[in-house]
Structures are given as structure tokens and as C-alpha cells.
Image (cartoon, grey):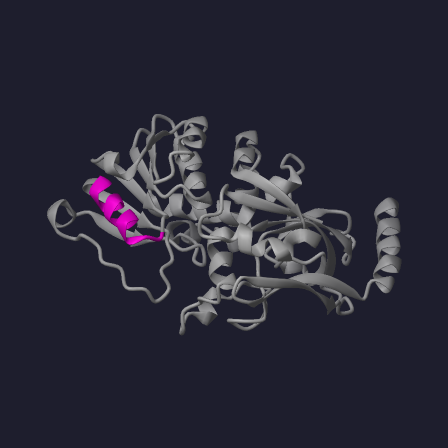
Amino acid sequence: MAEQSSLSRSASLSTAKTKSARALYYTAPMQAEIRTVPLSALKPDEALVRTEFTALSRGTERLIASGLVPSGEEARMRCPLQDGDFPFPVKYGYCAVGVVEDGPAEWVGHRVFVLHPHQDRFVCNVSWLNRVPDFVPPARAALAANMETALNAIWDSGVSAADKVVVVGGGLVGLLVTWLAAKMPGTDVTLVDINPLRAEIAGHFGAHFAMPAHAPEGADVVFHTSASQPGLATAIRAAGKEAKVVELSWYGNREITAPLGGLFHAGRVSLVSSQVGTISPGHAARGWTYSSRLQAALRLLADDSLDQLITGTLAFDDLAPAIPRLLAADAAGLVTIVTY
């Protein structure tokens, strides 16, 4: 306790000299810059966090960086600790891992995950802090928000042991869903994607791989994550009689055509949405909260095989000029981790 109090006093002295921080702002289509932002004085229920890692969320941040948030969807697209309004300038992101430098004594010195944009230090209410387990490497912990999305989808799907599962879309969330589903005893999981390079990761996760033209049929549960009309059609074709298709994609205000004839109608296939903003109803009824769900997602990140999803690292100082390359539609790789 004495050591922790000493840490707190030391951090307070450091904070007194640190009145500002640096944050990434999207300023125009595919343009970004690092800006100096003020740090507010700490309130009793707030903490100062020194960032170690953030993850670049390619799908969502590509939309933000392109200035393509649909009209009428601005409120739903806001991240919890965002600054600015769409389209620009806006500070955006929700995958930060860091160490608490100042604040309540029970938090000082602890490594935490916070739904915060790319910024080297920040102040937030302690209610936003989520302790990172000691057995989870801090860089990998930056994937917690995406794992939380995948976990919620698994809950929404009702998938169980020995089920035949198809996941359409091999981006980060689709691969995390694949990993979770393949962990269940006896499941037969196939990842479907247009990129054949995803086959190797699928294999390491204990799943099969198929191109869309060769996607299996008759699945018990299908997950769709590609955010494309052809992908949704593939997902529906893969479903078996009385099966469930779980839609994780976000389309904004785009209208999507789906093939709802044939087996979909005759086979009583269910098409359901899964969105991380709402806890799966069955789990919510049993007392699961946003905090306990995120803590579960962090614990799930203990598996070393998940490091395959991190395909690049970049220093925070180099992030702004790299945004056009990292968020390009044809960008290679999966997850870029930003180091501080």
C-alpha cells in the first residue's frame, strides 16, 4: 500500500507538468494530423492514462477517414469518448491500452483497456477503465473491442457443440468469430472469403476455408461479416433448414438486396442482427453487463494464436501520414497496432 501511495504521489507530480497530450484527428477525406489537446485537471472519479498501444479499426475508421458517415447515422456512429462531429475534424477510435498514472489509488499502476481514440495520454472517468489481465499481452489486449463484438455474436447465434458453422467474411471480426466457434467441441467451422490468404489463418484456428463459389451448404449457424450484398447472399445460401443467419455487418443507410426466396422461405431460415451496442438479451437477463462482457473478451485474448491477426505495427508519430495507406480499400494485412 505504501508503495502504491508513493506511485500515486509520483504520478501526481508528473501530471502537474503534463497539461496537454497529443491526439490523432481526421481532418479531411483520408487526411489526418496529430494535434495537441489540453488535459483537464483530475476529478476524484477520474484517472490519467498513459497510452501504450491502440489498434486501428480498419472497417470503421476507413468510413470515418473517408468522411462517409451516412446522414442520419451520426449519433449511432459516435464512439464513446470521441471529440468533434462528423465529418471533420474528429478524434475517433475505441481500442486503447495503457497504464493509469494518476487517479484513485486502487487504479494507479494498473494496465487498462479503454474505449478511447488514438492519443498518447488521456483523462477519463474510472467507469471507463477495464483491467487487463496479467496473462494477456498488452498489445493483444487492444483487440478487446473486436473480441467483444465476436463474443456477443456467438451469444446471439445460440451456436453449440458439434454444429456445422459457416462464417462469411474473413476480416478481423469474422476471424475472431471463426476462432470462437472452432473452440467449441465437435464444431465443423468453415471460413468463406474472397481472399485465399485467409486460408492459412483459418487452418491455424481449426477451421476449413472456402471461396464463395464453393461455400458449404446446410449449416446450422451462419455468421455474415463482409458488409457486402454478395456476401449476404452467400451466407443465406449456406444456411440449412431452420438455420440462423447472424448479420454482424453495418450498412448505414445503404439498401441491400437479399435472396429471400428458395430455401430461405421454404426452410424457415432466420436472419437476425447482432450489434455490440446491445448485450445479447439472454445474457443481459442473467446479469451480464457491458463491463463484465468486456472483461470476458479480455480474458479470451490469452491465446497466443491470436497474434496472427496483428499484421503490422507503427509508431504513433508516424500514424497521420500513413492513414491513406493503412485505410485504403485494398490495404494488405488485418490489424495495425499503434505503439506509443
Residue 232 highlighted magenta (yes or no): yes
In depth, the one of 63 and 99 nearer the eye is: 63
Residue 78 in view in this figure? yes
Drawn side of residue 207 relative to residue 234, left or right: right
For residue 310, above or below residue 225: above
Image x and y of residue 275, in percent: 40, 55
Image x and y of residue 81, in percent: 60, 64
Where residue 174 sits, quadrant-wise, is top left
Drawn side of residue 41 relative to residue 62, left or right: right
For residue 32, above or below residue 261: below
Residue 129 in view in this figure? no
Q: Residue at x 45, y 48 (%)?
A: 330
Q: Residue at x 24, y 34 (%)?
A: 216
In depth, the one of 185 and 170 nearer the eye is: 170
Main SS of the magenta segment?
A: helix
Count how many numbered circles sit on residues in the image. 0
Where residue 277 sits, quadrant-wise, is bottom left
Residue 247 highlighted magenta (yes or no): no
Image x and y of residue 160, in percent: 33, 35
For residue 149, above or below residue 178: below
Drawn side of residue 197 relative to residue 87, left or right: left
Give the residues drawn in magenta, as a range: 227-238
Image x and y of residue 271, in percent: 25, 51
Q: Residue at x 64, y 37 (%)?
A: 137
